[in-house]
């Protein structure tokens, strides 16, 4: 089975000011966000990626560039509109502290599956399109490059949280239990019988084991021996 590495974009100017950027154009990584994306690119440099797919929004494309610049090959690097940020409608561009006073805020926290943002998208539709996009891309990369293929999807916090919730088999109403920080790395494998989540929300650590990691079969009883990084040449 292929492996997808889910990467959230680095911190943005909007994140720093507590704004819900949504799909607002021109929202860029700030200095801290660029440093975060560079660290993620360095972590992934040891992994020969077959592709880097990005949300079309600028902050994700910038983050993807830090990853691509550290790859020795030339991985496929398309944009995928189905991985773009949730359409927050009338909430877009507002301060989070002000949105927290809205009646809908408590529903977002406790029952996301019932949320439809005014003038925007439902959270259920957000999850459906993003999960479908990830599974479609994953199947295509595996068909082209084989079961050892490793690829990256660069997207947004709520998008990645909803993908991880699906991978864990969690109801969308529980997805707020998952944290996805700026430029964090989460790792998922889709199998024919079961999806496996190998990591969530990591911002440090060696990823070179992904370069030679065998596809998993049955889950090891007791947890198994873990991953072994490939030997240094």
Image: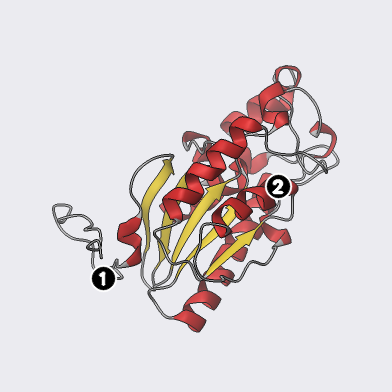
Q: Is residue 188 above or below residue 9?
A: below
Q: Is residue 17 above or below residue 217?
A: above
Can residue 224 be seen by looking at this rendering?
yes
Dot 1, crowdedness within 10 Å: few (<14), some or many (≥20)?
few
Q: Residue at x 56, y 70 (%)?
A: 75
Can residue 169 be seen by looking at this rendering?
no
Q: Position of residue 66 (x, y in %)?
A: 58, 51
Q: Position of residue 164 (x, y in %)?
A: 48, 50
Quadrant containing the C terminus in the rendered view: bottom left
Quadrant containing the N terminus in the rendered view: bottom left
**Nearest the camera: 16 or 122?**
16
Per the image, label 2 sits on a secondary structure element best described as: loop
Per the image, label 1 sits on a secondary structure element best described as: loop
Q: Position of residue 141 (x, y in %)?
A: 52, 75
Dot 2, crowdedness within 10 Å: few (<14), some or many (≥20)?
many
Q: Residue at x 74, y 48 (%)?
A: 58
Residue designated by label 2: 85
* Left or right: where 169 falls relative to 109: left
* Count of marks overlaid on the render: 2
Q: Position of residue 215 (x, y in %)?
A: 31, 70
* Left or right: where 161 falls relative to 88: left
Q: Residue at x 41, y 62 (%)?
A: 47
Residue designated by label 1: 217
Q: Residue at x 42, y 49 (%)?
A: 43
- Alpha carbons under labels 2 and 1: distance apart: 33 Å
């Amino acid at each position: 089975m292929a492996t997808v590495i889910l990467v959230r974009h680095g911190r943005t100017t909007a994140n720093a000011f507590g704004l819900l950027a949504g799909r607002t154009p021109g929202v860029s990584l700030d200095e801290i966000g660029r440093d975060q994306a560079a660290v993620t690119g360095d972590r992934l440099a040891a992994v020969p990626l077959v592709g880097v797919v990005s949300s079309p929004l600028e902050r994700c494309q910038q983050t993807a560039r830090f990853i691509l610049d550290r790859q020795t090959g030339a991985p496929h690097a398309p944009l995928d509109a189905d991985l773009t940020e949730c359409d927050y409608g009338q909430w877009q561009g507002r301060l989070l502290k002000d949105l927290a006073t809205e009646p809908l805020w408590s529903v977002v926290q406790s029952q996301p599956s019932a949320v439809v943002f005014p003038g925007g998208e439902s959270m259920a539709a957000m999850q459906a399109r993003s999960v479908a996009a990830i599974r479609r891309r994953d199947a295509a990369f595996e068909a082209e490059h084989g079961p050892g293929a490793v690829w990256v999807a660069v997207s947004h916090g709520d998008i990645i949280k909803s993908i991880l919730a699906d991978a864990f088999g969690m109801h969308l109403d529980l997805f707020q239990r998952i944290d996805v920080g700026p430029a964090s790395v989460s790792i998922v494998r889709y199998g024919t019988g079961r999806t496996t989540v190998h990591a969530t929300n990591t911002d440090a650590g060696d990823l070179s084991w992904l370069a030679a990691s065998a596809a998993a079969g049955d889950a090891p009883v007791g947890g198994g021996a873990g991953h072994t990084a490939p030997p240094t040449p």
